[in-house]
Structures are given as C-alpha cells and as structure tokens.
C-alpha cells in the first residue's frame, strides 16, 4: 500500500506547555488508526494540525507526497481530508438535508449553494448518504431536534457526500452512550473500508480502539508512547500508558 | 491586642455606597421645599388628565382619525424598518468580519464598517428628522430616512455582534468540508443567528412604531401629531384615545413577534 500521510518531526507548543514534541510517523493508504492516550496527550492538537486548523511550530506534513501547505485552498483540501468531531459540528437550525449537502459545497459556486436552499441541488447524494446511515426518514427534519447519535449519523452522511481520501475523527463518540458509540464507530469503520478511505480517529476507549481499528498509536506528553498493530497491544501497554505520575 | 471590633471589613464598594448616600442626603438640603416646587395649577391638570383616562373619546370622528393616524404611523415605521434592515445587513455583515480572509483585512473591515454604524446611531432619530425636514422638507421621506439611519446603525451593530458570537465548531466543520467564506455565511452564520436576528428586529420594529409616533411631532402626520393637537386644545379624552391606539399597535407587534419566534424555535 502506498504512503498517504507522512509526519516529519512535528512540534507544537502552547505558551510554555509542550503539546507535541517532534512527532514522526507515516500512514499507508487505507489504514485505520486509533489515537489513544491520556487527556492532554496531544491527540486533538495532532488532528487539528493535520486538518490545517492549527499550524505546527516545527516539522512538515506530507499528504500524498506534497506538503500540507499545498492544500491551503479549502476546496482542494476538502477533496483530500475530511473531518468529523462531536455532534456540535452541525448547524442545528438547518434541515438535515442542507447539513448533509454541505459536503458538496467544495464543488458548488455561490449561486448554486444559494439556489440549493430553495431547490436542493444534487439531492440524490444526500438521499444516498442518509440511506446509508439509516436516516432516510429525517431528510427534512430540523437537525437540532435529532438525538446525539442521529446527529452524528448526519455528520457521517455529510462526510460520505464530501468523500475525502482521508478521514480525521476527533473523539467522534465522546458524548454518546456505549450502544450508540459502537454503532457510530462500526458505521465509520465500514464506510472507510468500503470507500477505501484512510481513517484516523482519537478515542478515549481502548476497547473500541482494539475492536474497530487496525493500528493503534498511543500518545503521552506529546510523544509517541507506542505504535503497534491493534492485535498486539497488551493490557500491560495500556496500563503503563494511562498510569498516573504519582504511581510511577 | 485584638482589634477585630475596629477593623470591620470596609470594602471599596461599601465606601462608595456610603459616599453616594451622603451625597444624596446632602442634595436634599439644596431643594427649596415650598409651593413653587410644582406648578400650582399642575395638580389640577394632572387630575383632569387622570380622569380623562377613564373617559377616552370614542366618537366616530375621533376613532376614524385615530385609525388613519395609526395607519400612517405604522407605515412610516414599516418603511423605516425595512430600510433599516437593509442597511443593517449591508453594513453589519462586513462589520462582523466573518467574510474577511485574513486577520488584517478583518481588522480593517471591522473598524471601517463599525465606525460607519457608530456614526449612524450616534445621532438620535429626532435630530436626523430635523436635519431631513430642513433639507428635503416635510415629506414622508424625511421621517422614513430619519428612522432608517439610526435604526440601521443599531441593528447593524447588533447583527455584527451576533455573527461574531456564533459557536466556532460548525463553522470550522463547514470550512473543512470545503465551504468558501460566502458559503459559510449562508450555511453556518446566518442560519445560526436567524432566530435572534428576527426577534431583535421585531423588538426594534416595536421601538420604531413608538419613535415614528414621536417623529410626527416634527409635523409629519400620525398618532403623535394628533396627540400634540389634542393636547394643545386641552382635549385630554382625545389624547387618551390616540395613546390607546399606540399601545394597541405595540401589543399587536409584540404578539406577532412572539408567534414568529415560537414557530422558528419550535
């Protein structure tokens, strides 16, 4: 499998706190990676840097061989990288269909995106995506009346419409109960496999990381603590990863 | 030695409170407490006005006049408000800086448009009315412009603040999905502030009705003008009829606004 993401000595410091200290790793196309680690380990910072929301203080990121700075134009970037976070990502005041069709905005001009409010454009994309996540009946519902799990499905549907090569998921199930969390992760992992996408998700739950992902990268204090295939991560690894300082 | 009985906590704010109280009490001594304090005939007039409250003039002539005056007050307010909303969007959206591509243009745009909005609302609508009456004469346009400019300034400022206070996450998500600045405005900012904008604009519309009644004192017809005429003739019961019509207008708009909000929030 060819390499799709490559991080080279990425560092990021907030005020005086080191968030990431010279992080390097590479990801092959089609891999699914779980980022785990204690709170404040730098998981969100890393994902935000890869999504171009933050810029690293040092180091370079290559996407498909070209530096991330080549993707300054968000239209071009959206084709490569998609982002999903907790359900606060949706515009609650809009009907579900417009939140899903927002995945098409990188292809639409100003006029078409305006017209879409009156006559939804490329509606078949939204219909197909919502069918895939099982929310076909909510097409015209106001997004804010949906439950947390349903809203996260809408966000997944938007990602399906956007169809990027890489999906970055930051705590995608943090605010969901276990049943809904598994449901969303299952859907996310399946979509990534079927669409041949590369998936990278930060998680709090080690159990989910082992169940739904091939490779686990553990971060601690801004450094890679271990980087192993999911199957070979042992309880001892996990125990030392989450061990509090006082006990050390 | 224990001095706790002496050093009771004299907080700065308590000192200020005491000073202000002292100033207030001292100020009472400078008032001349004699019969000249209130105009001697004033009490009689106040009584007449109060009695008239319970006997508003409900004759057909006055009612018809009141309906006509209400209609013109309402139409000035509506026309002024429509123009104000237009001004508010034209100036408010750039003033919020949400369309700016980088920090520098954002700073320039914000200060330029916020400055203009500030100028518009720094001058009261009555002063604008004088200026317009002086320049374009006693035409309805004078009243409409006089309302639209300061109200546009106020609304634009509030719109800009609302747009700036929108939660960041959905906007970042839209940008990650490839939305341009203008698209984030349509798909993120505007839907998120829609309810607050409508409810604030409705509140301002209510204010505009009251203001447009006052505006008619300048000599442009309407409820205020009728109140003015009836007061001059000492017809207090007519005054109350017109005042009740004004209250009625405000209540109707308030009810409409509530109903609209309920439908939007659901």
Image: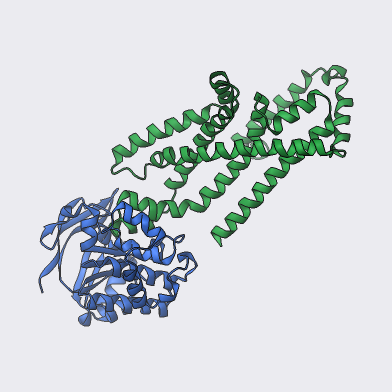
Chain colours: A blue, B green
Q: Residue B72 in the image: state x and y as whole percent.
A: 65, 36
Number of numbered tags placed on the structure image: 0
Does the image show residue B71? yes
Look at the picture and state if B66 lies above or below A177.
Answer: above
Q: Which of A7 and B29 is in front in this view?
A: A7
User: Residue at 88% across / 30% down in the picture?
Assistant: B48
Residue B190 position within the rendered picture, expressed as x and y whole percent measured from the top left = 43, 51
B82 relative to A127, above or below? above
Q: Position of residue A64 (x, y in %)?
A: 13, 63
Residue A148 image-quadrant placement: bottom left
Does residue B3 appear in this view? no
Left/right placement of residue B9 relative to residue A138 reads right
Can you say whether A107 is above or below B152 in the image?
below
Location of the C terminus of chain B by quadrant is bottom right
Which of these two is toward me, B190 or B27? B190
Residue ID at (21%, 72%):
A197
The residue positioned 71% from the left and 33% from the top of the image is B223
Name the one closer to the observer, B64 or B183.
B64
Q: In which quarter of the image is residue A35?
A: bottom left
Query: Residue at the location (54% across, 26% down)?
Result: B123
Q: Is residue A139 above or below residue B242?
A: below
Relative depth, front residue between A37 and B224: B224
Which quarter of the figure is the N terminus of chain B placed in? top right
Q: Determine whether, in the image, residue A153 is placed left or right of residue B23.
A: left
């Amino acid at each position: 499998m060819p390499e799709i993401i490559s991080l080279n000595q990425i560092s990021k410091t907030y005020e005086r706190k080191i968030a990431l200290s010279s992080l390097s790793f590479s990801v092959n196309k089609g891999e699914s990676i779980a980022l785990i680690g204690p709170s404040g380990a730098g998981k969100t910072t890393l994902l935000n840097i890869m999504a171009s929301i933050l810029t690293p203080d040092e180091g370079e990121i290559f996407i498909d061989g070209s530096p991330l700075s080549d993707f300054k134009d968000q239209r071009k970037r959206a084709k490569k990288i998609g982002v999903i976070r907790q359900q606060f990502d949706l515009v609650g005041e809009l009907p579900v269909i417009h939140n899903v069709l927002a995945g098409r905005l990188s292809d639409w001009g100003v006029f078409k995106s305006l017209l879409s409010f009156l006559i939804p454009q490329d509606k078949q994309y939204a219909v197909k995506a919502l069918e895939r996540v099982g929310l076909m009946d909510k097409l015209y519902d106001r997004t804010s009346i949906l439950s947390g799990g349903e809203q996260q499905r809408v966000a997944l549907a938007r990602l399906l419409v956007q169809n990027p090569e890489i999906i970055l998921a930051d705590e995608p199930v943090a605010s969901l109960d276990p049943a809904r969390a598994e449901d969303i992760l299952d859907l996310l992992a399946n979509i990534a496999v079927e669409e041949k996408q590369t998936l990278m998700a930060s998680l709090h739950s080690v159990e989910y990381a082992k169940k739904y992902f091939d490779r686990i990268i553990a971060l601690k204090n801004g450094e890679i603590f271990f980087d192993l295939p999911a199957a070979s991560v042992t309880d001892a690894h996990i125990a030392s990863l989450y061990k509090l300082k006082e006990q050390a | 030695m224990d001095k706790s009985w002496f050093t009771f906590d004299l907080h700065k704010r308590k000192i200020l409170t005491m000073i202000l109280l002292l100033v207030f009490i001292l100020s009472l001594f400078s008032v001349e407490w004699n019969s000249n304090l209130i105009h001697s005939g004033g009490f009689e007039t106040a009584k007449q006005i109060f009695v008239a409250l319970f006997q508003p003039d409900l004759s057909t002539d006055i009612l018809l006049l009141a309906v006509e005056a209400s209609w013109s007050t309402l139409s000035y307010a509506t026309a002024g408000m429509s123009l104000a909303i237009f001004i508010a969007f034209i100036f408010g959206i750039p003033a919020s800086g949400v369309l700016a591509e980088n920090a520098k243009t954002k700073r320039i745009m914000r200060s330029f448009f916020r400055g203009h909005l500030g100028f518009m609302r720094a001058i009261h609508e009555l002063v604008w009315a004088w200026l317009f009456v002086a320049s374009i004469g006693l035409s309805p346009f004078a009243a409409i412009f006089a309302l639209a400019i300061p109200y546009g300034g106020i609304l634009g400022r509030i719109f800009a603040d609302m747009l700036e206070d929108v939660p960041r996450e959905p906007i970042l998500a839209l940008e990650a999905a490839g939305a341009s600045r203008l698209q984030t405005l349509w798909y993120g900012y505007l839907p998120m502030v829609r309810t607050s904008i409508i409810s604030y604009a409705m509140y301002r519309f209510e204010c505009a009705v009251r203001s447009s009644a006052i505006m008619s004192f300048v000599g442009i017809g309407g409820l205020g003008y009728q109140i003015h005429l009836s007061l001059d003739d000492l017809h207090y019961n007519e005054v109350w009829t017109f005042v009740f019509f004004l209250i009625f207008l405000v209540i109707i708009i308030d009810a409409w606004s509530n109903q609209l909000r309920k439908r939007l929030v659901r």
